[in-house]
Image (cartoon, helix red, strand yellow):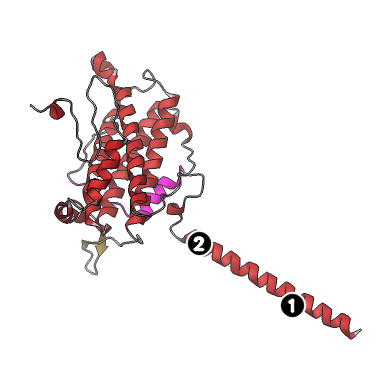
Amino acid sequence: MPSSYKDGAVRGFGVVSHNDDDHGKSTQGAETNDSRRRFLAGSAGALGALTLGSAFGAQSALAEEHEDGTETEGPMEDVFEDDLAILNYALTLEYLEAAFYGEALDNMDADDVTVEWADELPESIRERVYDRLTVIQEHEETHVEFLTGVVEDLGGDPVDEPEFDFGSAVEEPAEFLSTAAVLEDTGVGAYAGAAPFIEDESLVPPALSIHSVEARHAAFVRELGGQIGFPDAFDEALPKDQVLEAASQFIVSDAAVMDDGEDDDDDEDDDDGEDDDDDATETEDDDATETDDDY
């Protein structure tokens, strides 16, 4: 058996999975950079065209109600300006998840992160829970690094990391697990909702790769929280506005990708108002000057 299979290495996109001995030490750097170059070269174009329709397209729809009361699936609206907008959208969500796990694991140790049914498990398995959560956090950091590099490789500007406030969700173990499940489920739905609108088909394989890993995360934290890890045969694709609504409750600083254009409109309105005030002031000054001249 090849050593890469024995060690559990998956190097297709520069990510190395973890065996039980290394407890979550990841290999990044050169492999991540090399993977970006390879997929940006378009080597997986045919695969991208196939997976775009089959894996994501079938679920990227919203229900439409007809006059007879029946509902059918209609296409989800494309609200993304271009591929860079989709990548920065995904990057913001990865920032969110990486920060969430990072803060939680800094605040809690292995004894804190437990589950109600832990006593039924062998100690060797209980000890792995914290390590597995650490691996998830490392995955999210790797996704951040990867997506940042892709945006830069495409000539774009990666969106800045927002400031987050997770409150007690990164302090209380039970709340941490329930929030982790919500965030992971939201991430899975976000990738499924955005992927059909990717124009460069060479970007689809890595999007699929991240999407499937996020689904694994979701299943794991769901089970830890006492929920079934795979409740449905099909996952729901989520539209951007619904995803941003869920994520915005944890974001306390402005993030360009979260604005969705609304703040820009408000700013323009404010600017217009300021201009009107300036015009009014200038008119008053002119009138006053003319009055003085008359005298």
Q: Quadrant of the C terminus?
A: bottom right
Residue for badge 2? 264
Asked whether residue 67 is drawn in magenta, I would say no
At 41% from the left and 31% from the top, the residue drawn is: 102
The answer to whether 57 is drawn above or below residue 185 in the figure is: below
How many neighbours does mark 2 have within 10 angstroms: few (below 14), some (14-19), or many (20 or more)?
few
Give the residue at mark 1: 283
Residue type, label 1: Thr
Res. 27 image quadrant: top left
For the residue carrying disc 1, how many other residues have a C-alpha within 10 Å: few (<14), some (14-19), or many (20+)?
few
**Left or right: 111 with respect to 49?**
right
Closer to the camera, 195 or 236?
195
Q: Range of the magenta residues?
A: 234-250
Q: Secondary structure at mark 1?
A: helix
| Tally of numbered discs | 2
Image coordinates of residue 31 in percent, x first then y, are 27, 37
Q: What is the quadrant of residue 282 in the picture? A: bottom right
First reached walking from the N terminus: tag 1 or tag 2: 2
**Label at residue 59:** none
Q: Residue furthest top?
A: 123
Q: Who's the residue at 45% across and 25% down the image? A: 107
Residue 252: tell me if it is visible.
yes
